[in-house]
Amino acid sequence: MSAEQKKTAAFFDVDGTIVSTTIVHYYVQFRSYLLPSFFRPFWIAWFTLKVVYYFFLDKVSRTRFNRVFYRNYRGLDAENVKQLAGEQFETYVRSKLFPAALDHIREHQDRGELVVLVTGSLDFIIQPLADYLQVDAALTVQLEEAHGKFTGELTTPPLSEAEKVRAIQTFVEQHNVDLAASYAYGDSRADLPMLECVGNPIAVNPSKGLRQVAIESEWEISEWTIGGK
């Protein structure tokens, strides 16, 4: 009896690769909805100062940034925020999708290849997108809950850098995937380990650091926009 034929997969980062968003955008959308309208301008002004800190922290370590940033969710009602995430997909996220990303996802699906989202974004934010795209799996992170509220701590390490590869390796073992024949799409240096673990890496709208690596490694580089392909 011959061994089962290995499958090909396409692993997609989400923020900056499939959609023109970041985990900061999602949180601001939630907070803006939950806050009284008269208080929003003051909160936005205050939060903008924190964004400067987050920007530099992200430059140092995406993993550290994710862990610190998600503490902003501490004390928020879990069910309320999850419900808002579903509404936010329709009112905000869908308009941020890159048409070229949708085309590439469909091409992989038409060829019978597995499509997997691999992202440091939260599970309840990504699930509506995963359902819309009809992908085979979404590898995400979860916030810890206690007494119906988020604690601000993740239940697992942030899904960035080497952790993305660990998550992919687990998926590969469970689904008999051939990484050498597979694809990965990412936009930042935090995606570099994921891109390096497959045979067909594609740098999408790459950051300066990732672009340099992609050029030196002779990887495919794609520029995707909201208004075009």
Image (cartoon, rainbow, N blue to C red):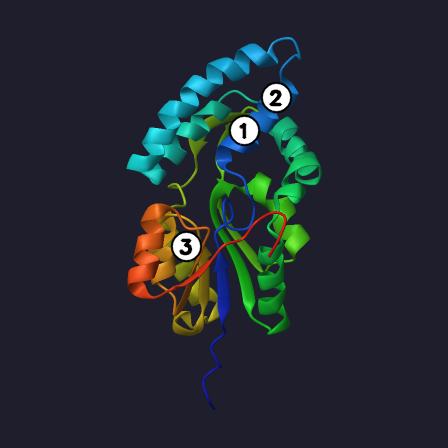
As measured in the structure, the alpha-carbon distance from the residue carrying label 3 to the one carrying label 2 is 33 Å
Q: Is residue 90 positioned above or below 38 on the image?
A: below
Q: Which residue is denoted by mark 1 in the rendering? A: 27
Sooner in the amino-acid sequence: mark 1 or mark 3: 1
Task: Give x and y (percent) for residue 152.
Answer: 45, 27
Identity of the residue drawn at 67% across and 33% down:
83
User: Which of the marked residues, 3 or 2, is nearer the chain's N terminus?
Assistant: 2
Would you identify the image quadrant in which residue 104 lies? bottom right
Question: First in sequence: mark 1 or mark 2?
Answer: 1
Mark 3 burial class by Cα count in 10 Å: few <14, some 14-19, many 20+:
some
Dot 3 falls on a residue whose secondary structure is helix
Is 80 drawn above or below residue 136 in the view shown? above
Does 87 sit left or right of 47 as displayed? Answer: right
* Residue 185 location (% of width, % of height): 46, 58
Mark pair 1, 3: CA separation: 24 Å
Q: Which residue is mark 2?
A: 32
| Label 2 Cα neighbours within 10 Å, binned few <14 / some 14-19 / many ≥20 | some
In which quadrant of the rendered view does residue 124 lie? top right
**Which residue in the structure is indicated by mark 3?**
167
Position in image of residue 133 (x %, y %): 64, 55
The residue positioned 63% from the left and 48% from the top of the image is 227
